[in-house]
Amino acid sequence: MGGTWDRADVDFDSDGTRCAAWLYRPVGVEGPVPLVVMAHGLGAVREWRLDAFAERFAEQGWAVLVFDYRYLGASGGEPRQMLDIGAQLADWRAALAFGRSLPGVDSARIAVWGTSFGGGHALSTAAQDHGVAAVVAQCPFTSGPASLLSRIRSGPVSALWLGVAAVVDAVRARFGARPLLMPMAGVWWMPAFLVARGAMAGAARLVPEGTVLSRRTSAAVRRLGPLRRALPPGMRLSGADGFDPAATPIGRDSIWGVLNGPGGSFAAANALAARLVLRLPFYRPGADLGRITAPVLLSVCDRDSAAPAAATRRYAEGHAHVQVRRYDLDHFDIYIGEAFEQAVADQTEFLAKSFA
């Protein structure tokens, strides 16, 4: 279709916290239009390739709302770098309510699109909200037990460290201490949430070219060859004159990685509060597939160990309203290059049929 669109910065309230979002609107399209509500996974922010997907959907003449969860990215909330499953699901509900209130949006044609951990949230949200017209879950987190087992296999010693950190963080939280941050993505010996082969390099490829790492992180990367080799060419290290993370929404530096987008366009961190580990085994959004009344597309990466594909395919079995598109890819491959082109084409076709 190749239509033109405008993008505006907007925000909406979620339980008293401001969630920042981009709103894409098609130009020159008459009448109420469909809306796609989108959010990322784990601790990622919208600048990490969600704009690429949103632009393709906006070209179809659809409105698109892309938001950051509370405690992350440009959204409000304290403490920073928290991932609270219940709070994020509330953010999804608030985003849908905001989307339905927008003039020019057809409230009967609203889809939810989530990727990775956000893919699981999209499934849980649609299971509760039967007004949703379609669901796209890309490389979705569907089974806490399956992901936990995969994480242990990828690095059992570092998984133990991460578990200990989670307990310590939970105890500290009871005394009002700020979160104990552990890396989102890392190599096998790091106490990271994701340490599958290529996880760190794959996550780094989602970051816009010209992004700068903080001074503390840059110093660590220079000393450690495996970390330095995992960085894409477009990511820059900073020296003594590097940006101050305290001046960004992150509020503090972290050895795991604080990032400043090109021209200060965003601030993010490769870090999350460790206490999340204690909740992950009990979150199984794949079990909600049977309660969704809208058509569902699962874009599954068969070599995915961060969100194990086999578990997702098992949950999809026997559901006539669920389509599974399989790709011979790893978890982060689907966001870029030819893999992105194929996935976004498949998703666009699915949404067009669902909105018809």
Image: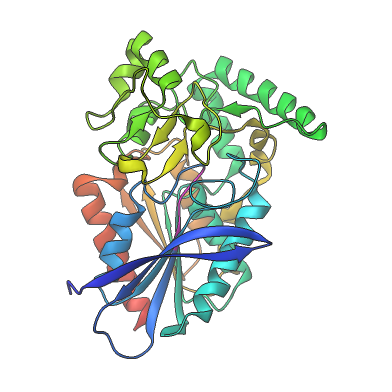
Kindly indicate the quadrant of the structure image that contains residue 233: top left
Q: Nearer the viewer, residue 202 or 245?
A: 245
The reply to whether the magenta stretch includes residue 99 is no
Is residue 187 at least partly visible in the picture?
Answer: no
- Residue 319, horizontal then vertical, whole percent: 50, 66
In the rendered view, would you say 121 is above or below 184? below
Task: Identify the residue at image location x=48%, y=54%.
Answer: 119
Q: Quadrant of the C terminus?
A: bottom left
Task: Identify the residue at image location x=46%, y=70%.
Answer: 320
In the rendered view, would you say 287 is above or below 258? below
Q: Nearer the viewer, residue 44 or 259?
A: 259
In the rendered view, would you say 121 is above or below 7? above
Left or right, residue 210 beside residue 196: left
Main secondary structure type of the part rendered in magenta: loop
- Residue 305, horizontal then vertical, whole percent: 44, 35
The reply to whether the magenta stretch includes residue 41 is yes
- Residue 264, horizontal then vertical, whole percent: 36, 42
- Residue 352, horizontal then vertical, whole percent: 31, 76
Q: How is the image coloured?
A: rainbow
Is residue 11 at least partly visible in the picture?
Answer: yes
Please provide the residue range marked out in magenta.
38-42
Q: Nearer the viewer, residue 194 or 246?
A: 246
